[in-house]
Amino acid sequence: MSAYALLLSQDKEVQSILPRLLGGMRIDTEIVIDVLRAARLLRERKFEAIIIDCELNGADTLLENIDSYPSNRTAVLFAIMPEVDTRDGLPAGAKLMIVKPVLAEQARRMLYAASGLLIHEYRRYFRCGLEVPIYLAAESRELRAKTTNISIGGLAIRTLEEIRLAERFRLKFVLPNAVGLQADAEVVWADTKGRAGLRFLELPELAHRRLQTWLDSKM
């Protein structure tokens, strides 16, 4: 697993302790010290964990507006708060709290308690390169293409034929381990170079398990 965390804090102790603990969980940490830089990274990249020091000016607004960053709406969101402020509970948007001053053992317990959430988020977003033939069938036409990557939620393809946004297909393809899969999917993006992304609308339970098992083997 190689997941990513965004840490927004100017506290040197926080910057020392948390990345070390996250590294032990195979999570790489991007440290930023100002809210504007954090907001830019949230627009540009996907993070499994977002850790925000609430003592920074503008941090509360960033927490409240996480939903405005589409790739990070479901990230595991931690709020770092002084102990004196914890009596008011979690700030809006946060899922978990880390208390300042940050103690290594206390923070380790909190992060490991959240490890299940972090793994779930990583698995949900994880994309694996995959180049295999794929057959797409709609009511009015059929076409062949090649996959370029796949996740538990959908896949990307390239084809010589035109693909239209919102077009729906029944997909058939075979994973490299010889497991055949079928799914209903919808085109969510397409460009003029024959590349497109499809979101699974219906993936049967057995197919879902087989795909997840294969993806887990590639993490």
Image: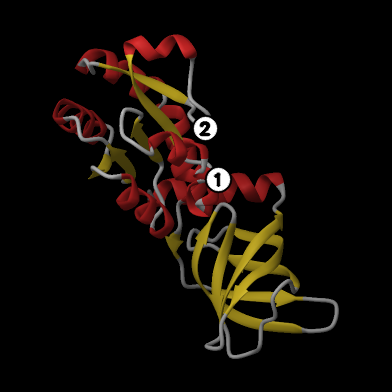
Name the disc covering residue 208, or none. Answer: none
Residue drawn at (79%, 76%), measured in percent from left and top? 138
Q: Is mark 1 on a helix, strand or loop?
A: helix
Q: Residues within 10 Å of mark 1 (few under 14, many from 20)?
A: some
Position of residue 183 measured from the top left corner of the image (x, y, whole percent) = 70, 60
The residue beneath circle 2 is 93
Residue drawn at (58%, 85%), measured in percent from left and top? 159
The residue beneath circle 1 is 67
Q: How crowded is mark 2: few (under 14 residues within 10 Å), some or many (20 or more)?
A: some
Reply above or below: 144 against 151.
below
Q: Is mark 2 on a helix, strand or loop?
A: loop
Residue 78, picture quadrant: top left
Furthest-front residue in view?
57
Seen from the viewer's position, the closer of residues 15 and 121 is 15
In the displayed structure, does residue 147 sit left or right of residue 24? right
The reply to whether dot 2 and dot 1 touch (C-beta < 8 Å) is: yes
In the displayed structure, does residue 157 sit left or right of residue 87? right
Q: How is the image coloured?
A: secondary structure
Position of residue 85 measured from the top left corner of the image (x, y, whole percent) = 39, 14
In the displayed structure, does residue 121 sit left or right of residue 25? right
- What amino acid is at disc 2? Gly
In this view of the protein, can residue 8 be seen by the observer? Answer: yes
Circle nearer the N terminus (2, 1): 1
Position of residue 4 measured from the top left corner of the image (x, y, whole percent) = 33, 45
In this view of the protein, can residue 1 be seen by the observer? Answer: no
Reply above or below: 154 against 219.
below
